[in-house]
Amino acid sequence: FSIALLPPITNQPGYITGVVYNASTDAPLQGVRVFLKDVPGAVFTNAQGKYAFPAPVSGPALLEASKPSYHYANRTIEVVSTRETGVPPIYLVPVESITHITAAAGGVATAHNGDLVVTFPPGALPQDADVTLSLIMQERDLPGPVPDGDVMIAAFFGEPTVIFNVPVHVRMRL
């Protein structure tokens, strides 16, 4: 059997704590903006990649981490406002390429020396867009957890509401 030890409940406010790393180097990442979605305010990671801030409320929350030139990440956490909430390590993947794709003409975006190629046919995008690509080889580097029973083979980092008008072609050489 196992015993789970939780930090004691106190009248003091709890904290949300964690560490953010560069997925390419495994080094701590300074200057990452960390915040809870729909909660005002944010903190930035220190030189050791660590962050901590008071738990504003109890219940489920979406923690987000972002830094320019890196893909974002998020984690769903269960916050207890009177306990410390430790968030598993977050790994941010550096953006390898940014390609401007026009909706009318389409285009090709590549990353990782051609190991990842996405072809956008004309009309696939509803509007012009800057497409950022990086090859992600480890599950820990994904922007969020993969649901049980699913396998992530490709992700589109951009506006969460983009719906392609026609299929795009993704080629990965592993």
Image: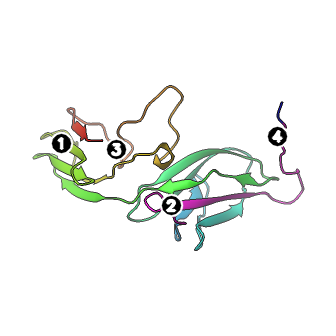
Describe residue 92's horizontal placement relative to residue 162 as left or right.
Answer: right
- Foreground tag (1 vs 4): 4
Circle 3 sits on which residue?
Answer: 156
Residue 112 image point, x, y percent: 27, 53
Question: What segment is highlighted magenta in the picture?
Answer: 3-28
- Residue 97 in sight from this viewpoint: yes
2 or 3: mark nearer the eye: 2
Label 1 neighbour load within 10 Å: few <14, some 14-19, many 20+:
some
Can you name the residue that lies furthest to the left here?
105
The residue that appears at 65% across and 45% down in the rendered structure is 77
Mark 3 vs mark 4: in front: 4
Mark pair 1, 3: CA separation: 13 Å
Pointer 4: what residue? Answer: 4
> How many discs mark residues in the rendered view?
4
* Helix, strand or loop status at disc 3: loop
Mark 1–mark 2 Cα distance, whole angstroms, equals 31 Å
Find disc 2 in the rendering and name its residue: 26
Q: Amino acid at mark 2?
A: Asp
**Rendering coords of residue 66 (x, y %):** 48, 60
